[in-house]
Image (cartoon, rainbow, N blue to C red):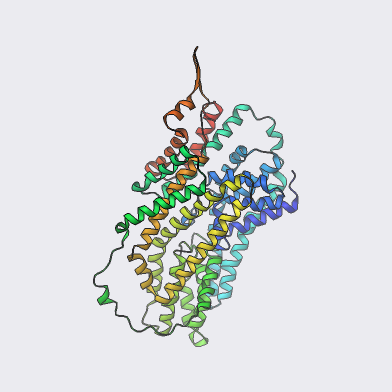
Amino acid sequence: MTITILQAVLLGLFCGIAKCCVPYTAGAFMFNTVIFNAVVVGAVLGDMPQAMIIGASLQLIYLGVISAGGNQPSDPCLAAYIAIPVAMASGLNTTAAVALAVPVGLLGAQITNLIYLMAGFFAQKGDTFVEKGNAAGMTRWSVIYCAIARIICFGVPVAIALYFGSGALQGVLDNIPAAVTNGLSAMGACLPAVGFAIIANLISKPKYIPFFFAGFFLIQYTKIGTIPLLMVGGFLTFLYITFKSNEFQGETDEDDDDEDEEEEPAEKLLSKKDILKSWVIWWFSAETCHSFERMQAPSFCTSLVPALKKFYPGEENKPRYIEALKRNMTFFNTEAHWGGGPILGLTLALEEKKSRNYEAIPGEVIMNLKTGLMGPLAGIGDTISWSTLMYLLIGLFLPLAKKGNPLGGIGPIVLLTVICFGIGYFLTQKCYTFGYSFAENMLKSGLVNKIIAGASILGLFMMGGLASTYVTVSTPIKFATSAYTTTLQSIFDSIVPGLLPLIVVLCVWGYLSKVKRNYFAATLGVTIVSLVLGCLGVII
């Protein structure tokens, strides 16, 4: 297959758009995973089944990769747009594509860091327009132009690399020694363990770890599919949460009833349509402007602009309007659904209250509320939406992807977008309507604790089952006597089925949790060890 210049340009453009994370849910899915990007590659190159099969194999090594706080250990998106097309054009098998994806993904993470550094310039340029009360200019520079720059920084190199370099590996393939081929195969069998270990390390608590083993051995002994596995996991999670419900109750304040004597709320200035508009702006652009200097602040400020114009209308209120823009252009970073939704709603409520009685609420109160909530709520969102729900959905649809079906990539992104968009808008609406009391009561009721615990339990159970399915390392070592010949693998199977895959996952998990939480080192270590052992014929 030869990649044409049009195909190279299209793939570069789609890669750049994916790196902009627009809209937030679907964009972050593409930013942190391979599987939907494989659908795009298959559509552009005209070979959907092959793209999905390769993409499913690549996805396994990137399970658990999320860009929490903007820090991404590897770049699945760039790996997808380089490794899949090159593998298809050069005739590489899936294990060789995995080998190509690892260094490309690590390089992409460093390019992303440089772009985050560059984005600080656009945020500063936006400040000059804020000083004049020109919100359109602020949005144009700090959000729109920043997004265009990101598209160019990724799109142009990808297009050039695919057009001029896609055939460069063809001459190399014929001269690869058999030992190296076996090493690449062993590496492909072991690397998925890194992804499963990362997820387990992110969402696990010591008391929930047995659920990982339950899922692993359930698959080993029964060979059931992912849907039955999910049903069993959901039932076990329900039982655990039901019988342990007292553990998840939040702290209550006995004096709340005495202290919660609030005045009759004034009529709200914003309609549901206004709230939806602010939420959609935030949801669409939350990560587009990401920089080390301000993180998501320009997008958050942009989402407030329509409401702030209602709160501070006319020239006479322009100084207060400018002050509101300034305080919402300060550093801000959170998960956009569980963090951005409540904080957006609370900020709108406080800004409205301040506009009614300007001296009653100091601007520092609004800024401090955002700062105090953004970290804890981001932890909730990263755990539920990205570390658990996203990978549960990918796990459910991955068997379709491995068969070459594009629904394996489309299903997870559609379901995740619908679910998370609804959650974010609901939290935004409620926190604007009821103010801080809604978020406070949600935390005190223990509902969030139950959601996190349930997500952790179900996530560990499913990751155990999926690790049992997709970490396929084994050993070909044989023992021969005058009477019989046996294999080391058969001995392992007689002791515990799936022993080698389990050992690999537990070794990586142990390193991440007990030694050092360094995803790069874990990936590099597994890559080197599995490649060497594979070349030596110890594992396959």
Q: Quadrant of residue 10?
A: bottom right
Q: Residue at x 29, y 80 (%)?
A: 261
Residue 472: x percent and y percent? 52, 36
Which sits in the foreground, 112 or 346?
A: 346
Q: Residue furthest top?
A: 482
Q: Residue at x 26, y 75 (%)?
A: 257
Could one spot residue 530 in this view of the protein? yes
Residue 441: x percent and y percent? 34, 69
Residue 195: x percent and y percent? 49, 45
Could one spot residue 131 in this view of the protein? no
Q: Is residue 377 left or right of residue 179?
A: left
From this view, report whether residue 144 is shown above or below residue 396: below
Q: Residue at x 68, y 34 (%)?
A: 173
From this view, report whether residue 528 is shown above or below residue 141: above
Which sits in the foreground, 56 or 494?
A: 494
Q: Quadrant of the N terminus?
A: top right
